[in-house]
Image (cartoon, coloured by chain):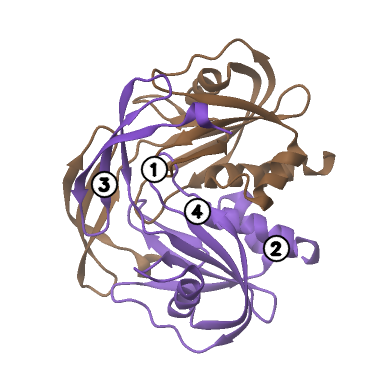
Chain colours: A purple, B brown
Amino acid sequence: MAKHLEEHELDSVSVYDGGLLKVWRDTVRLPDGSEAWREYIKHPGAVAVIARNAGGNLVLVRQFRYPLRLALLEVPAGKIDPGEAPLPCAQRELREETGYVARDWTYLGLIHTCVAYSSERIELFLAENLEQVGASLDEGEFLDVVELPIRDALSAVWDGGITDSKTICAMMWVQRLFGAHC
Amino acid sequence: MAKHLEEHELDSVSVYDGGLLKVWRDTVRLPDGSEAWREYIKHPGAVAVIARNAGGNLVLVRQFRYPLRLALLEVPAGKIDPGEAPLPCAQRELREETGYVARDWTYLGLIHTCVAYSSERIELFLAENLEQVGASLDEGEFLDVVELPIRDALSAVWDGGITDSKTICAMMWVQRLFGAHC
């Protein structure tokens, strides 16, 4: 379908192997036969969770995002550990960040967050029938759990209260799944 | 509002200064007084454009995204040049990528694409009353212009045809602005 757009790897070099960020610089063959370089982050993948509590509210987290120097309202989310499958990762992240376990899980879809310079892909899940068992944050992780009526979370997309892209993507699903009831 | 979540910079070091990616590693003071490091990309910012043509179709682009080794369907978008304001950047990117100029521009909102490890912010605009004047792609840039009924673009969010996060965010705006008419 898009053969005429494809770029082919000629060479791949690790140029920065940080504690968090793994940067690669590849030489590629462009569709017109010429050569170019592509610099990008190899990312292990992540998950995000739309969690809806018994009262029909969304369970969100407010977290300081240092690269932006801002605290943002987001759906619970996190990176996949080596060897971990997306669903167990989603269950782990929801529990660690919010203290909730969910009886019902539904896979919703895939989001590519940062297509120009990262291989990151986020698998989005819906978690329902929640039970509170107590959060257990990673060391050095600080966040507020914010339980918000769906109507307020949707408004926050329009008034700038929610700007995180994975969370806006999640809100589009929320609107589809629950928008008629709020 | 979120003082108790704030992290404060103690030291900031450029650890990778690539052709595209500028990686920094900062030492920070966490809310509990302990120290940690934060590794992230400093990004100049970007724009994205919802362009709606005379027939009411959306003007999208299909582009090979090397970090993912996939061709993705996206709203026209691009990085802000040094000293450039967001609106002129949006006008430039729309014209370069699709050949369209627009008489009417509306600012919609802000998207943070990659909050865990990049300072990137995308300003989202709506462009209407389009006129085709011919595209002028950057050297080494290859893409297809795809004009799609709004209904099809919205379906693509649900069936995996659109996975790019800024484009899904844009589709949520499209649904709000034009969803009733499709």
The image position of residue A102, as x and y in percent, is 58, 81
At label 3, the amino acid type is Val
At label 1, the amino acid type is Pro
Q: Secondary structure at mark 1?
A: loop
Near mark 4 (Cα within 10 A), the count class, few <14, some 14-19 or many ≥20, is many
Q: Residue at x 32, y 42 (%)?
A: A40
Q: Secondary structure at mark 3?
A: strand
First in sequence, mark 3 or 2: give its number.
3
Mark in the foreground, 2 or 1: 1
Mark in the foreground, 2 or 4: 4
Q: Nearer the viewer, residue B136 or A167?
A: B136
Reading the image, the residue beneath label 3 is A23
As measured in the structure, the alpha-carbon distance from the residue carrying label 3 to the one carrying label 2 is 40 Å
Residue A156, relative to residue A84: is it above or below?
Answer: above
As measured in the structure, the alpha-carbon distance from the residue carrying label 3 to the one carrying label 1 is 11 Å
As measured in the structure, the alpha-carbon distance from the residue carrying label 4 to the one carrying label 3 is 23 Å
- In the rendered image, the quadrant that contains the N terminus of chain A is top right
At label 4, the amino acid type is Asp
Protein chain holding label 3: A
As measured in the structure, the alpha-carbon distance from the residue carrying label 2 to the one carrying label 1 is 36 Å
Indicate left or right for B63 with B151 as reference. left
Res A151 label: 2
Res A164 label: 4
Protein chain holding label 1: B
As measured in the structure, the alpha-carbon distance from the residue carrying label 2 to the one carrying label 4 is 18 Å
Residue B23, relative to residue A143: is it above or below?
Answer: above
First in sequence, mark 2 or 4: give its number.
2
First in sequence, mark 4 or 3: give its number.
3
The image position of residue A33, as x and y in percent, is 37, 20
Outermost residue on the bottom side: it is A133
